[in-house]
Image (tube, rainbow, N blue to C red):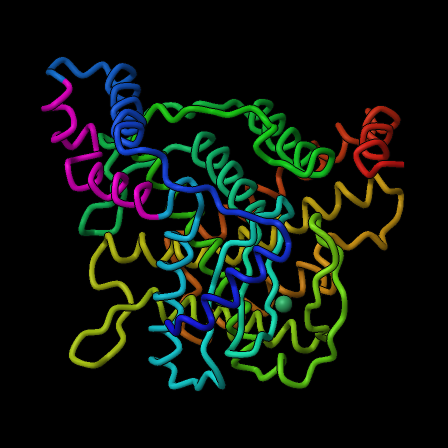
């Protein structure tokens, strides 16, 4: 990564008066990790001591995991640059696998504002892909609610789940998951901060890992979509327009629906390529049962992301009393975008997976009417809050 591009990113943040959260002091990192581990230990019913719990399969953390968490917090503090660097590496590997050419260097950076979207902008030395911090907190909580509402099990070599490895009953009832999702969306829309919604603790490391992997998959797609704009050459030809962000206007590049669909298709292609494994110079899918799970998780990212986008947009339209309300600027409706993604998956023959990617869409759709029903029956109160949040 050239220093000048990264400098341009730092300069942009400085201009806007934005700062990323720095790393906490060392002892705090260790204390945070220990707390996480001991919470899991307490709720596990494990009879041995904490140290052997961490090593055990049931603990699921292991020393490597703890070290990785510690490194991550030390390196990128409480911000998300660590995740973005990982996503950029995966996307760039997929770009070279597909033999796409990037016309210039790309830097992917966190944009510390609370809204739920991403944007690409042209600066002197290259392209900046800016992923809003709000996207992380929103997707993080949404995948957590998903993970807490479903059961997980290991898959055997025959591809069937092993009943004895099930995580046990789900932590959330139907009503609770709907309530949690409604609260999350309203926290985001009314206060611009998904973190204002109730925080939930994981009782099981497997659920935590699954939510983390799905969250990473959503972020991967957000980054891959912006690369799609770069690869598609949309940023060179597009007219600049000014987008309103919580920290003032930002010049972004105006794109057409056609370009958005193209970016979704290219983004989905990069996501698929990043999920394959190279063996003897050939890209293969599903080398073993675990690989199928990883593929399915990765491919669930774009679908989950677009479905969440649709649910938030529908709630926002309900509050504003208009269908014109488009949360994410110039992006086309999510149904059409999802079908572009599915078409791309089908081109790789990846239609019948372990169904996580289909299931997460059904999971959101199943609660859509309930969420909207709650909003409708509390509309005057919610509208009032929304107006005051907008400063009217
Ligand atoms: Zn776009």
Instruction: Please state which of residues 276 and 82 is positioned toward the viewer in this rendering.
Output: 82
Asked if the stretch drawn in magenta spans residue 51, the answer is yes
Residue 138's spot in the image, x, y percent?
Answer: 56, 41
Judge whether residue 167 can be spotted in this image. no
Magenta range: 50-75
Residue sitting at x 61%, y 47%: 113
Q: Which of 244 and 150 is in front in this view?
A: 244
Q: Where is residue 11 in the image (x, y as percent from the top left)?
A: 55, 62
| Quadrant in which ligand 1 is drawn | bottom right
Q: Position of residue 315 (x, y in %)?
A: 75, 41
The vertical placement of 258 against 384, above or below, is below
* Residue 216 against residue 90 in the figure, above or below: above
| Residue at image point 38% right, 57% down | 353
Image quadrant holding the C terminus, namely top right
Which quadrant, please, contains the N terminus?
bottom left
Q: Please indicate, yes or no, whether residue 35 appears anywhere in the rendered image.
A: yes
Residue at figure coordinates x 49%, y 40% from the top left: 140
**Which of 108/275 is in front?**
108
Front residue of 166 and 52: 52
Does residue 242 appear left or right of residue 36 in this picture? right
* Quarter holding residue 254: bottom right
């Amino acid at each position: 990564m050239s220093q000048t591009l990264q400098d341009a990113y730092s300069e942009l943040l400085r201009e806007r008066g934005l700062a990323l959260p720095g790393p906490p002091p060392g002892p705090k990192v260790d204390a945070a990790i220990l707390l996480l581990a001991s919470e899991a230990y307490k709720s596990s019913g494990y009879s041995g001591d904490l140290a052997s719990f961490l090593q055990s399969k049931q603990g699921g953390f292991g020393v490597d995991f703890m070290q990785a968490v510690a490194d991550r917090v030390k390196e990128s503090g409480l911000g998300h640059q660590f995740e973005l660097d990982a996503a950029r590496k995966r996307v760039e590997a997929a770009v070279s696998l597909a033999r796409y050419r990037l016309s210039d260097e790309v830097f992917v950076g966190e944009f510390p504002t609370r809204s739920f979207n991403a944007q690409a902008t042209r600066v002197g030395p290259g392209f900046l892909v800016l992923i809003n911090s709000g996207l992380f907190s929103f997707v993080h909580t949404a995948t957590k609610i998903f993970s807490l509402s479903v059961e997980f099990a290991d898959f055997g070599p025959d591809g069937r789940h092993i009943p004895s490895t099930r995580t046990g009953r789900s932590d959330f009832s139907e009503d609770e998951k709907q309530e949690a999702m409604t609260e999350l969306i309203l926290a985001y829309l009314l206060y611009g901060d998904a973190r204002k919604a109730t925080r939930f603790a994981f009782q099981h490391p497997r659920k935590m890992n699954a939510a983390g992997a799905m969250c990473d998959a959503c972020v991967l797609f957000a980054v891959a979509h912006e690369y799609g704009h770069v690869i598609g050459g949309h940023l060179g030809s597009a007219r600049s327009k000014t987008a309103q962000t919580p920290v003032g206007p930002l010049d972004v590049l105006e794109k057409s629906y056609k370009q958005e669909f193209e970016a979704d298709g290219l983004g989905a292609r990069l996501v698929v390529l990043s999920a394959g494994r190279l063996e003897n110079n050939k890209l293969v899918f599903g080398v073993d049962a675990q690989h199928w799970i990883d593929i399915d998780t990765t491919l669930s990212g774009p679908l989950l992301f677009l479905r969440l986008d649709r649910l938030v947009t529908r709630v926002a339209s309900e509050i504003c009393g208009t269908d014109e309300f488009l949360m994410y600027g110039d992006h086309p409706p999510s149904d059409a975008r999802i079908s572009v993604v599915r078409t791309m998956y089908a081109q790789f023959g990846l239609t019948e997976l372990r169904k996580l990617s289909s299931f997460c869409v059904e999971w959101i759709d199943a609660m859509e009417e309930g969420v909207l029903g709650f909003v409708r029956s509390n509309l005057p109160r919610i509208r009032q809050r929304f107006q005051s949040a907008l400063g009217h």
